[in-house]
Image (cartoon, rainbow, N blue to C red):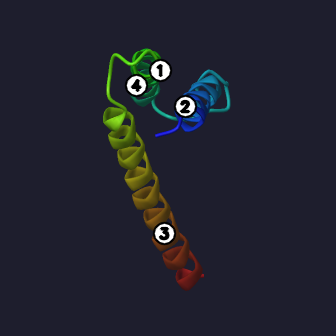
Amino acid sequence: KSILSIILNLFEMLISTLNLDKSENELPQPLKNSLISLAEFTQKHTLSVLAGEADHSVLVDINESIIAGLRQSAELLAGQTILQTGAA
């Protein structure tokens, strides 16, 4: 795992959490809190990885879980759109 990809991963996570504080963000507060907590963990673990004190595999696992969740959400939204279009 390259240092650049680890830093970019951290940057993406931090940018994502900035959007959680925006008033137009309609996510439930418990989910926002969980995502902020995950970002804080990611930041700490990334710094440990960069210092050579931890393995990057935890970061890979987090990313894979996020991707799987986003994929599932996209599939659900696509299914709802098809149902709404078919019902019209």
Give the Cα distance between marks 1 and 2. 7 Å
Q: At x 58% / y 29%, what residue is drawn?
A: 7
Give the Cα distance between marks 4 and 2. 20 Å
Given the current orientation, which residue lies at the most extreme bottom position? 86
Could you tell me the amino acid type at mark 2? Ile
**Of marks 1 and 4, which one's residue comes earlier in the chain?**
4
**Of marks 1 and 2, which one's residue comes earlier in the chain?**
2
Q: At x 47% / y 26%, what residue is drawn?
A: 32
Give the Cα distance between marks 3 and 2. 40 Å
Apparent side of residue 79 relative to residue 84 in the rendered image (left or right): left
Query: Mark 3, mark 2: which one is toward the viewer?
Result: 2
Label 3 sits on residue: 80
**Of marks 4 and 3, which one's residue comes earlier in the chain?**
4
Label 2 sits on residue: 3
Q: Label 3 crowding class (10 Å Cα cut-off): few <14, some 14-19, many 20+?
A: few
Label 4 sits on residue: 38
Could you tell me the amino acid type at mark 1? Leu
Please determine whether, in this image, residue 68 is positioned above or below residue 51.
below
Q: Position of residue 79 (x, y in %)?
A: 46, 72
Q: Position of residue 73 (x, y in %)?
A: 44, 57
Residue nearest the viewer, comparing 43 with 15: 43
